[in-house]
Image: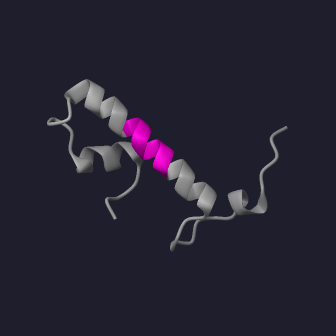
Amino acid sequence: MVMTSPAETRPHRGGRPTREQAARLDLDVREHALRLFLDHGYEGTSMEAITQAAGTTKA
């Protein structure tokens, strides 16, 4: 059985992410960027493509 903290079970209400959420997002963006760079090259990869792949926004 996987235990989750209360913060993980609450719906996201907007605003700043928790430290854990920010760390996960940072890792997700880096992983997706690397994959896109390897697939399309640095010049062939846009910020829009990275954010879309990571499920986030440029902001």
Q: Is residue 40 above or below residue 51?
A: above
Where is the C terminus found, in terms of image quarters?
A: bottom left
- Is 30 within the magenta? yes
Outermost residue on the left side: it is 43
Where is residue 5 shown, x and y percent of the image?
Answer: 78, 56
Where in the figure is residue 37, as x and y percent of width and height? Answer: 27, 32
Identify the residue shown where x is 60% and y is 61%. 19
Q: Is residue 47 magenta?
A: no
What residue is at 31 percent from the left and 59 percent from the top? Answer: 58
Here the colouring is: one colour
In the image, residue 35 above or below residue 13: above
**Residue 55 placement (x, y as % from top left):** 41, 49
Q: Nearer the viewer, residue 20 or 55?
A: 20
Identify the main secondary structure in magenta: helix
Q: Residue at x 25, y 50 (%)?
A: 48
In the picture, the quarter occupied by the N terminus is top right
- Residue at the outermost top position: 39
Segment colored magenta: 26-32
Q: How many marks?
A: 0
Spot occupied by residue 12 in the image (x, y as percentages of width and height): 58, 66
Judge from the rendering whether residue 22 lies leftward or rightward of residue 9; answer left or right: left
